Image (tube, helix red, strand yellow):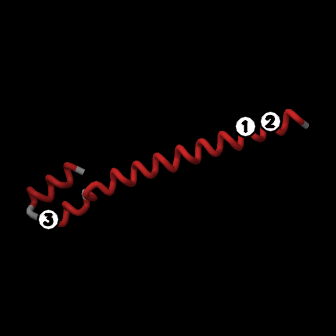
Amino acid sequence: MALVWQYGEKSGNESWKGLSGHGLVALQVALTVMGNATMCFTAFRIYNSSERTSKIM
């Protein structure tokens, strides 16, 4: 992000600064990590549930 911002300053083309996302990229990363962790936890719970069910039968 910093390199894109610097390129926008040095080239004189201010529209490059918008590509850096103004922090939106960091928010997207945080939400993706949270979503992936939630999916992992849910998959683990499903796996545990199926293991217990298969041992009973």
Judge from the rendering whether residue 33 lies leftward or rightward of residue 43; answer left or right.
left
Foreground pick, 41 / 16: 41
Helix, strand, or loop for circle 1?
helix
The amino acid at mark 3 is Glu
Foreground pick, 25 / 49: 49
Helix, strand, or loop for circle 2?
helix
Q: Which residue in the protein does label 2 denote?
A: 52
User: Mark 1: few, some, or many residues within 10 Å (few <14, many ≥20)?
Assistant: few
- Picture coordinates of residue 25 (x, y %)? 33, 54
- The mark nearer the N terminus, 3 or 2, is 3
The amino acid at mark 2 is Arg
User: Mark 3: few, some, or many residues within 10 Å (few <14, many ≥20)?
Assistant: some
Judge from the rendering whether residue 8 lies leftward or rightward of residue 46; answer left or right.
left
**Number of marks in picture:** 3
Q: CA distance from mark 3 to mark 2?
A: 59 Å
Name which residue lies at 15% across and 55% down. Answer: 7
| Closer to the eye: label 3 or 2 | 2
Helix, strand, or loop for circle 3?
loop
Relative height, residue 40 to residue 10 (above, below)? above
Judge from the rendering whether residue 49 lies leftward or rightward of residue 21; answer left or right.
right
Relative height, residue 6 to residue 52 (above, below)? below
Name which residue lies at 40% across and 48% down. Answer: 30
Query: What label does residue 48 carry, if any?
Result: 1
Q: CA distance from mark 3 to mark 1?
A: 53 Å
In which quadrant is the C terminus drawn? top right
- The mark nearer the N terminus, 3 or 1, is 3
User: Mark 2: few, some, or many residues within 10 Å (few <14, many ≥20)?
Assistant: few
Foreground pick, 30 / 17: 30
- Picture coordinates of residue 20 (x, y %)? 25, 57
* Contact? badges 1 and 2 (CB < 8 Å): yes
Name which residue lies at 24% across and 51% down. Answer: 1
Q: Which residue in the protein does label 3 denote?
A: 14
